[in-house]
Image (cartoon, rainbow, N blue to C red):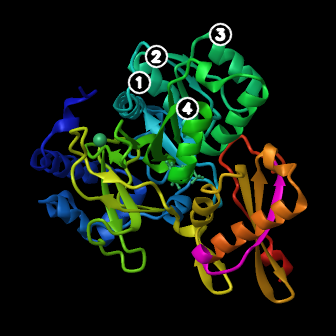
Amino acid sequence: MYFDKVEELDRNELEKLQVERLKKTIEQASNSPYYSEVFKNNNIDSSLIKTADDIKKLPFTTKEDLRSQYPYGLLTKSLDEFVRLHASSGTTGTPTAVFYTQKDLDTWADLMARSMYAVGVRRSDVLQNMSGYGLFTGGLGIHYGSERLGCLTVPAGAGNTKRQIKLIRDFNVTTLHIIPSFALYFAGKVKAEGYDPAEMPWKIALIGAEPHTELTRKKIEEMLHIKAYNSYGLSEMNGPGVAFECTEQDGMHIWEDSFIAEIINPETGEHVPDGEIGELVMTTITREGMPIIRYRTRDLTRFIPGKCKCGRTSRRIDRIAGRADDMLIIKGVNIYPMQIEKIIMAIPEVGENYLIELYREGFIDQIKVKVEIKEQYFVEDMRALQGLQKLIANKLRDEILVTPRVELVQHNSIEKSEGKAQRVIDTREVEK
Ligand code: ADP
Ligand code: ZN
């Protein structure tokens, strides 16, 4: 049924395992220059931990802490012991580097294989990895997991749609790993090349690495004629394979035998009540080379209460609502890009891509949303398009409480990056 027996461990057993591994992690972490200092200053050692809840006694680690320790400050072993490094894509500033020993890479590959198994991928499958390789963990992370599971693995990398399609057809690719914003673009291209998605060999898409709404998932599923599963991870916690959907598509199971997850109120640092949204905080408990304790991910989500129908006992998180630092403030109102995506992707005329532009006019903040329209609607008469523009603006106003300007643009006219999508362009600072 499951890839690993630990997936059905009862909660008490699982917590016991977490406590044991957390203690070991503290001991291991104290070999790093950074944590040895932090632990000394705060009188911390593993004897503090008796129950899983005692994790609250440990200090948080922030992205700034990692940056200040760049590059080697968190390593618990001599450099000789390490075999790989990755760096975060730097979506929000200077990158941070993460180092892995061979054992760490093996653990990661197992977690990744387990994740793929949970959505029905088996060794007989052929997996095409369509995300960029290099420092981005979505490349090698998925790659080694796929090999660990025993899949024939096609390291296609990002971009070059025509070649991707050829590889998929030539090698009967059944499973795609693809970033959601690229999946929408790709789906459009597949049709434009004259292929019927229903005739393609694929069955399963692993999508993740960036926030997207349920409607975007549905759109990907319909356009590609595929089942799409959400995959969550971050370089600081290895990369992908931290939390993954199962075939129920009802939240992402956190692999709690390897990570302890908490959800806190970002202002107070206290745990929020179960089911409430807050900032996800993660602790590695199986990483030896570079353990990280109570890492503030800045990702906003909630625990989904109750048990999953699949029988796995690990808790689930809801899809990421956004990053704390994605929040836009316009005319004093807080807005998350995902609120905008949720509205526009529900409108049938809307195509695959959008862009939010923030700028200043005089002293007033303005928000403009550029929305790609499906080809068949773009040829409609002016009045119909104006009506659509107005409809989108009104729906957005109801959601975000600010009336945006809406610009309808042609299919494929917004520039598409090969990696994570850039959804927001904010020119307000420069105009000051
Ligand atoms: P960077 O922080 O530079 O983007 P990473 O490649 O480590 O570098 O990205 C990790 C981040 O990507 C996560 O913290 C989260 O914000 C985002 N992310 C990853 N997977 C998902 C997902 N399934 N849904 C939403 N956001 C995701
Ligand atoms: Zn499940």
Q: What mark, if any, has residue 232 been given in the picture?
A: none
Task: Give the magenta part as a residue range.
Answer: 398-410
**Residue under pointer 2:** 125
Residues at badges 4 and 1 in contact (C-beta under 8 Å)?
no
Q: Secondary structure at mark 1?
A: loop
Please state if 295 lies on the left or on the right of 336 as rendered: left
In the image, residue 106 lies in the stretch drawn in magenta: no
Q: Nearer the viewer, residue 413 or 118?
A: 413
Classify residue 140 by image quadrant: top right
**Residue under pointer 3:** 170
**Residue under pointer 1:** 121
In the image, residue 403 lies in the stretch drawn in magenta: yes
Residue pictured at 38% horizontal, 26% vertical? 120
Q: Is mark 4 within 8 Å of ligand 1?
A: no
| Residue 92 spot, x, y in % from top left | 63, 60
Q: Secondary structure at mark 3?
A: helix
| Residue 24 spot, x, y in % from top left | 22, 47
Residue pictured at 60% horizontal, 43% vertical? 180
Residue pictured at 73% horizontal, 29% vertical? 191
**Residue under pointer 4:** 177
